[in-house]
Image (spheres, rainbow, N blue to C red):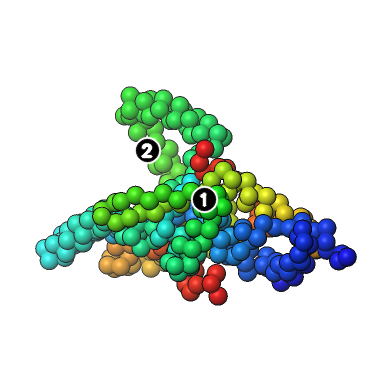
Amino acid sequence: MNENESLPSPNRLVHEPARLAILVVLSSCASADFVFLQNATGLSKGNLSVQLTNLEESGLVAITKKIEDRKTRTTVRLSRQGVTEIEEYWKTMDAIRARMSGAKRPALGRLKLQPAIE
Amino acid sequence: MTTLSVYNINQFVNINCTFDEANRDRLRRLRYVTENFQYLKGLTTVAFGVSLLAGSIADLFEQSWLIQLSLWTVQGASVVGMFRLPKYYQRRFGEVEHRPMTRNESIALAGIFFVGIPVLLVGVLFSRPLGRFVEYICAGISYRLHPMLADPNHLVNFMPILFWLLLLVLSISFRRNQRIDLRRTSMLFGGTLIWTVVMILPLHYPHLENVTWWKVLNAGWFGVSMILIGVYEHLTLVFLLPRASEVEQ
């Protein structure tokens, strides 16, 4: 048996860098549109679209599409489950960090989250 | 970078724990940009500053109708720009709906509102005596400050220095992201120093009062300040967003 077996396991759906970047953006606001997410994360349109679909299928984000000036505007917000998952994720990461290095510093500073949608 | 072996129900998964300093910094930047996106749309502030600058220096060039006409044109264009730039930001950088206020923030805002309204009412009702009182106080401060700087002729304009000093104090008080806000504080500190030097220069070189660039800076300090702050905010937004696909790399 490995010594690290008892380490808590972060949610792999959240841990993936592209999805984590999306979730960090969404956890800092009520909602963001596709263009902002693309600019903020630096992902290509295709990749962002795939990641958002994955997150939506897992129930972490809610996607709404509406037509404005004959163009489709995609807005994404974190669901209640998404808020819980990302909070859990930071707790897990802090626990892992604390175990690995004895550090008490949180993984991303003090992150106080609120559900973006009820 | 630390590599962890985590035991999952029936498999070992090697997770590259990507929480090295660079990654943490990237996520902090993302959070900062998202939370402050509204304030980082600096080009609107630039347009506002250009409009103010053009308006405030128009008096300096009364004799030249060509310069006057150019200034009006610039002023008109910047006002149009102020209305068009939000659309540009929406198209180029997207849109963010900010989080609803927390309970404490709402209480603070309500407090400001309930204190602010009576203060405003008193201000409107007693505007004349209050105005005279404020003028008296400012004149008192000014009459004490100028002799301290050996400036009996009131050559130094304190307003830009005080304005930048106020911004500097606010920036130090409301720091959220240490690294990014430290840059902003440094910029404001530099700005305060430069304005102080520019405004104090006529004490040593009295002929500067007749030099055009100094007259422009003195008359249009607020517009110039707005332009500088707007450019800084816009550049902050541009530089904080990933240039290449950092995540995909």
Q: Secondary structure at mark 2?
A: helix
- Can residue B48 be seen in this snapshot? no
Image position, residue A88 (x, y; %): 68, 50
Count of marks, rendered view: 2
Image position, residue A110 (x, y; %): 65, 50
Give the labeled residue for mark 1. Answer: A61
| Amino acid type, callout 1 | Val
Task: Tell me what residue is drawn at x 44 percent, y 30 percent.
Answer: B113
| Amino acid type, callout 2 | Glu
Seen from the viewer's position, the closer of residues A33 and A8 is: A8
Seen from the viewer's position, the closer of residues B181 and B130 is: B181
Q: If the image is split into quadrants, where does the C terminus of chain B sit?
A: bottom right
- Can residue B16 be seen in this snapshot? yes
Give the labeled residue for mark 2. Answer: B135
Task: Tell me what residue is drawn at x 53 percent, y 53 percent.
Answer: A57
B97 sits to left or right of A3: left
Image position, residue A31 (x, y; %): 46, 49
Determine which quarter of the picture holds residue B11. bottom right
Q: Secondary structure at mark 1?
A: strand
A35 sits to left or right of B57: right
Task: Tell me what residue is drawn at x 39 percent, y 58 percent.
Answer: B94
Question: Marks 2/1: CA distance?
Answer: 56 Å
- Checking the image for residue A79, the label placed there is none
Tag 2, which chain? B
